[in-house]
Image (cartoon, rainbow, N blue to C red):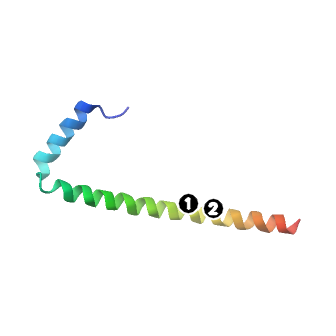
Amino acid sequence: MGISAGTAVILGVVAILIFGPKKLPELGKAMGSTLREFKNATKGLADDDETPKKVSESTKSEDK
């Protein structure tokens, strides 16, 4: 279900026609920074979920 090479070329040509060659690097940079922020935010959420489990597991082992 991936994108074939032909589809990627067509999407690239359409993107150049719509945005122009000068705007594409700016859009790529903005997309990269957005994805990086999203990744860091979701990593923080995953870390928050794991922290209480580790604390509760360590207190259970100390109680025994």
Q: Are marks 1 and 2 in contact (CB under 8 Å)?
A: yes
* Element under disc 2: helix
Is 6 on the left or on the right of 42, as rendered?
A: left
* Quadrant that contains the N terminus: top left
Residue drawn at x 58%, y 66% as measured from the top left: 48
Residue drawn at x 15%, y 41% as measured from the top left: 13
Up the image or down, 53 lies above or below 24; here it is below
Up the image or down, 5 lies above or below 19; here it is above
Return the residue at label 1: 46
Q: Amino acid at mark 2?
A: Glu
Residue drawn at x 33%, y 62% as measured from the top left: 33
Return the residue at label 2: 50
* Quadrant that contains the C terminus: bottom right
Is 49 on the left or on the right of 60, as rendered?
A: left
Instruction: Estimate the x, y position of residue 47 in percent, counting from the top left.
Output: 57, 63
* Circle 1 crowding by C-alpha within 10 Å: few under 14, some 14–19, many from 20: few
Up the image or down, 54 lies above or below 21; here it is below
Q: Amino acid at mark 1?
A: Ala
Q: Nearer the viewer, residue 5 or 1?
A: 5
Instruction: Estimate the x, y position of residue 20 in percent, counting from the top left.
Output: 10, 51
Instruction: Estimate the x, y position of residue 62 in percent, counting from the top left.
Output: 84, 68
Is 37 on the left or on the right of 49, as rendered?
A: left
Residue drawn at x 34%, y 61% as measured from the top left: 34
Instruction: Estimate the x, y position of residue 12 in percent, counting from the top left.
Output: 19, 42
